[in-house]
Image (cartoon, rainbow, N blue to C red):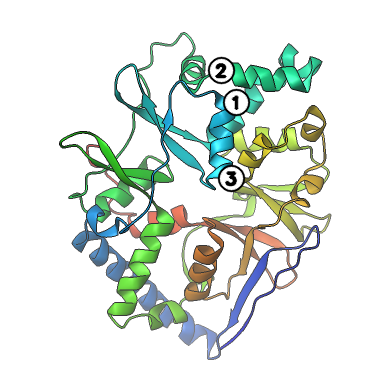
Amino acid sequence: MASTAGASPEPGTTAMVVDDVVNGSEAERTQAARADVQRFRDVTLDILRRSTCLDIIPDSGKVVVFDSELPIKHAFFGLVEHDIKCAPVWDSRTCDYSGMITVTDFNAILLHFYDSAEFRQSTDKFALKLGEYTVRQWNELKRGDTPLPRPKLFFTLPEDSLLDGVRVLVVRNIHRLPVMQLSPENVILCINNLQRILRFILHHIEARGQSSLLERIRVGDLPVGSFGDGCARISGSMTLIEVLKLLKRSRTPAVAIVDQQGRYVDAYSRSDVRYLAVDMTHDKFEKPIIDIVSMRENRMLTVTRRTTLDRMFSSLLSSRKHACIVLDDDRVVLGILSLSDVFQFFLENDLQPPNT
């Protein structure tokens, strides 16, 4: 097996390229890969069924919780400061959790206020506007006059199976799920995500002596991901505000920035939106997206169809990414593959969500 991995700090380059070359007859390898993929799926489901959400709670750690009366601006400063992408919201009026605030909310907030008079007139006034709105007021504004129920916090109990937890994440299309202890009072023990669950699965696969499965299976062997028209591609000249609107319209975790030949240049992900809280000016929203990503250090992971799963998973976990861009040998963008796609494949015949 040969592999290459490289990183470049130069603008317009990828953070990491992971590739593996596996020798042998392609037809024979493809047939064997189908069997390996099914074994990998069976082993994973067995681990998820046998494990509980309690098993994945770390021995130590912290859960950042925001009060519903916290100004929106401070909430997103908090996400950046703690290097997290979401936080549970505690409603002091009802003495209960009312939901989560996420980077998706921040994207929606920016788009909502973008055309406001406060934003157009002065960046300072726009920042002041964000300082006036609390997390609770944003939730009320988001609902408008529709008689929607208050936001619900999806969660699992420590004794729930890990399979139930994954099912909630996949079916509800959410990325983080609190593990809640209800007695003697509601306490969030940890917030699970697919990365943490994947790390747990890989540990148990290794303990079972089956790690070689992941060394044989390639990215192209998995029947998952968004390819062709399902993968959003943009030019580097598209403005930041246009990209934010595109992310709002679609469910993609990131958009690939390509040149005129469709070759990969960089990417902008949903989680990148939170960094706008640190430096938010009117000019920035009109800048080309290529200028925005050139100032960022932690770039998107890229793979090819030949990249083995052990390489891809290891790189996703070490870079704390939830998705990667799939390229061909000429660096043309083929698609995007996320952990949500992979876990949906695990559960494709078992997607009925539990009562949560």
Q: Quadrant of residue 93?
A: top left
Residue drawn at x 34%, y 72% is 203
Question: Viewer-nearest of labels 3 and 2?
Answer: 2
Residue drawn at x 79%, y 17% is 120
Distance CA(mark 1)–CA(mark 2): 10 Å
Whole-percent x and y of residue 197? 36, 59
For label 2, the residue is: 133
Say which label, 1 or 2, has the lower sequence index.
1
Image disc number at residue 76: none
Image position of 219 with respect to 125: above or below: below
For label 3, the residue is: 271
Residue drawn at x 25%, y 49% is 164
Image position of 141 with respect to 36: above or below: above
Q: Residues within 10 Å of mark 1 (few under 14, many from 20)?
A: some
Image position of 138 with respect to 251: above or below: above
Q: Residues within 10 Å of mark 2 (few under 14, many from 20)?
A: some
Query: Is any part of residue 345 visible from this angle?
Result: no
Q: Are marks 1 and 2 in contact (CB under 8 Å)?
A: yes
Whole-percent x and y of residue 125? 73, 17
5 and 130: which one is in front? 130
| Mark 2: amino acid | Tyr
